[in-house]
Image (cartoon, rainbow, N blue to C red):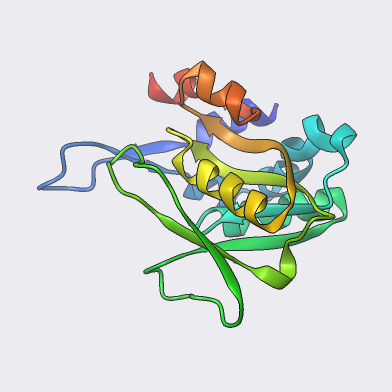
Amino acid sequence: MLSERLTELFRWVDPGPGSDHLVSDVSGWWRDPEVLAALGPALVAPFRPARPTVVLAPAVTGLLLGPLAATALGVGFVPAYKVGDGRLPAGAVSWAQSPPDFRGRRVTLGVRDRHLGPADRVLLVDDWVATGAQLRALHDLCAARGAEVVGTAAVVADCPPEVAAELNVRTLVDAARLLA
């Protein structure tokens, strides 16, 4: 089963001196070809009836998962770029700033205007939802472009139930299994 294999391949890593918390290591997910092949179809399965027309995902891990999900749906992919990551898009871009995330940071995300519009039914995709901050910024971007968000597919959600309900989050792994 995919959720069991994702759990087996997941690790917590101590980043070393000066850090007061462990860091999630999902690199095993990308290394396993069977997991990689199964992720896209598993993420999109709950949203097929909503008929998304595009997948939108934030840099960095979303740039891996988003195309897998889009391919499984047979739709296009739109990356959401982050200010400061060195990959700012050229041309007309819509930007939105997130509320504070789990570290208190506000992240500014942008999408190329020509890739998102009023005819789009958007599936948001990410690896981990902790506070929903970045997803809220993506919702703001979709609203600004006139697109409709149909929900959020994530590998793991470790957010309050009301956040998961508000953002219509569906996951593959119960966070409690990874946090134990």
Residue in the image at 27% along x and 42% along y: 104
Say left or right for 164 vs 48. left
Please identify the quarter of the rendering in which residue 102 is found: top left
Please identify the quarter of the rendering in which residue 118 is found: bottom right
Residue toward you, 125 or 177: 125
Residue toward you, 145 or 163: 145
Residue in the image at 38% along x and 18% along y: 180
Question: Percent position (x, y) of residue 177?
Answer: 48, 20
Residue in the image at 46% along x and 18% along y: 176
Residue in the image at 73% along x and 72% along y: 114
Question: Percent position (x, y) of residue 100?
Answer: 34, 42
Query: In the orientation shown, which residue stands out farthest toward the left?
Result: 18
Say left or right for 33 vs 47. left
Q: Can residue 168 be seen by looking at this rendering? A: yes
Question: Percent position (x, y) of residue 57?
Answer: 61, 53
Residue toward you, 41 or 137: 137
Say left or right for 15 vs 121. left
